Image: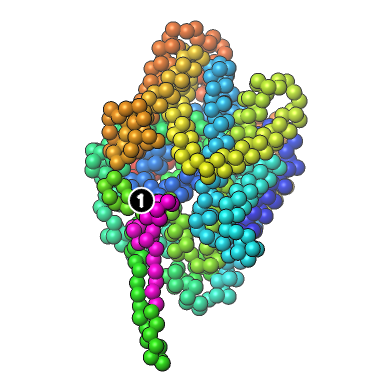
Amino acid sequence: MSLDLRLPMGLMFTLVGIILVAFGLATNGNTELYARSLGINANLWWGLVLLGFGLIMFQLGRRGQKRSANLPPPEPGTTEVRRGH
Amino acid sequence: MVLYFVFVLGIGFALKRYMKTSKDFFQAGRALPAWICGLAFISANLGAQEVIGMGASGAKYGLETAHFYGIGAIPAMIFVGIFMMPFYYGSKARSVPEFLRLRFDEKTRALNACSFAVMTVFSSGISMYAMARLIQTLHVFDGLFHAMGRPAGDIFTFSIVLSAIIVLGYIFLGGLTSAIYNEVLQFFLIIAGFLPLVLLGLRNVGGWAGLKATLPVAYMHQWKGVMHSSTNPMGIEIFGLAMGLGFVLGSGYWCTDFLVIQTAMASKDMDSARRVPLIAAIPKMLFPFLVILPGLLAIALPTPHTVETVTKNADGSIIHNIQVVSLQVEQGKGIVPAKINPVTGQPMLTASGQPLLDYDMATPNMLLHYFPTGILGLGLTALLASFMSGMAGNVTAFNTVFTYDLYQSYIHKGASDRHYLAVGRWATVGGILLSIATAYAAINFNNIMDTLQLVFSFVNAPLFATFLLGMFWKRATGHGAFTGLIAGTLTALLHHGLTLPIEAHPGIHGGWITVVHHYPSDMAQNFWGAIFAFSVNFLVTVVVSLATKPKPESELVGLVHSLTPKPAQHHLAWWQKPETLGIAILIGAIALNIFFA
């Protein structure tokens, strides 16, 4: 499999994070909206958390892909040896 | 939300290029890393009944619900990783029914494959129905539909069709790999959606101590009063709990259900395959906080009541501001509403006159209660994701079992790999269409759902005995396994017909033959039924096996414990071995249990 799941996943959470942060900033100080979340700007804070998570995942995926690009692709037979009986 | 759907389908398209053989499609090419499979392993199970059901049980039974994890899942997951995975993965079987054919015979496999295929289709249909119903009840799309000039009744169809198209899309394109990738995505999404909910909820009631102060003592202790059935909310004593849930039901599910096993079988080598259930057990230990706590919090919150505030305007006119709370909400507890009889519009009552609560609404109501616009979308997407991951797992399990165990074995033998790949794709379509049909059948016959789930429990209850004997006793024979399975299922049926939980009427809840025993709760009835089914299957299999001719030992190498060489582990350091990981997880689980005792 040459598609590393961490890339699309990182990308998705980064985008979701950006959207939430943007919405959170735009609605910052809107006490009516945030009354239900106990006055906490849940969009802003959780958006930041997701943004961080997404970026980390994306970086990890990028690093993993670079590493596998530097190494020669393993021969199809080599993984078979490590398999159990 | 739209963004999520785009990504889900995008993964399907990106993976389409790699789907060249049926092995790629059905088994993900057996090339995935362990952590991905591990997360998919729990995510496949993290379907509708998990997120909604565990929240509901949390509200109904309290922290005791965590037993489903501590006793029901973790030990079984460790067991399957350490002891059973070598046979599943090592036997080169492509599905659980195929393993049964290798170990026993054709008829045992056919029985298992048929019941399994039927079960997956119906459960994904039930999942779909539950999702559409929920979306309808939450009224989240009402505005959108109003703007488009469509009646609100269309929401049901819209949700079903939309979820079906999405799940179909990514499985049709990317097969099991795509299903697994999406399950991992859904796993993280569910955490992203529910973690802030728990944090906000806990903050509101004043943290853990505050929650403890508002709820009755028994709700907050996992083990209190477990020695006797009358002293704990779930109404089951320790033996029934440990045997029924831990040994029979839990192991039966985690060790034999192809729905979860398929993700482990997709991993890249034996070490990874054995590590998959163990990796899955780690987040599983922490999941009670995510899915059970919302239910507890929902009960702990103050119940809304109708209030009337009077304000005087500057010009002297009086404005009555009445916040009307419907009877449904007022009769409820916390923010869990009462169940309303659709005919009379009055709350339904239990036999003792208390309003019957609609516990399934606990978690969804928590989302609506705490999340402002914005993050609410994320929470609802997480809820949808949980429905879809459950559905997708069922659908991939169905297409594999259908293609390998029914189509290739009985309908069309020896065709080309291309042909089977195409069959697998169309089996996906067929499976989803059947699920949709089930979802619609469930509207008209509400009882169908309960009945189906009941029948599945009869079929599943005795399964673990067959696998246990098959893997660890070389003398067990095909005839023994077959008769044992049938006898076990019949026992479960009979047990259900003869017993009844207190406060239920004979019928769907049991006692439809005649009532010879009353259980304190439906849980107790359920667990004991499983124990009986398991024991009967075990005994019948042993007796019939001893009377019939066993398979020659040479055919059982790799399938039975005593005839299989230990998986080579010399290349692993001690801390890399699955056994070490298993013990560490067990200690962690015990520690958590003691902490919440």
- Residue bearing the label numbered 1: B348
**Quadrant location of the C terminus of chain A?**
top right
Please state which of residues B194 and B163 is positioned toward the viewer in this rendering: B163
Q: Relative to B536, is B475 on the left or the right?
A: right
Residue A4 place in picture, x, y as percent: 66, 48
Quadrant of res B440: top right
Residue B61 place in picture, x, y as percent: 33, 47
Please state which of residues B451 and B220 is positioned toward the viewer in this rendering: B451
* Residue at far front of view: B344
The residue that appears at 53% across and 64% down in the rendered structure is B375
Residue B388 place in picture, x, y as percent: 57, 47
Q: Amino acid at mark 1?
A: Met
The residue that appears at 35% across and 68% down in the rendered structure is B306
Disc 1 crowd, CA 10 A, few/some/many (<14, 14-19, 20+):
many
In this figure, which colouring scheme has been used for the structure?
A: rainbow
Please state which of residues B66 and B463 is positioned toward the viewer in this rendering: B463
Residue B7 place in picture, x, y as percent: 66, 53
The residue that appears at 47% across and 75% down in the rendered structure is A32
* Residue at far bottom of view: B315
Chief secondary structure of the magenta portion = loop
| Up/down of B168 relative to A7, above or below | above
* Residue range of the region highlighted in magenta in the rendering: B321-346
| Up/down of B75 relative to A36, above or below | above
- Chain of the residue under label 1: B
The residue that appears at 63% across and 32% down in the rendered structure is B400
**Quadrant location of the N terminus of chain A?**
top right
Q: Is residue B326 magenta?
A: yes
Q: Is residue B40 magenta?
A: no
The mark tally for this picture is 1
Is disc 1 placed on a helix, strand or loop? Answer: loop
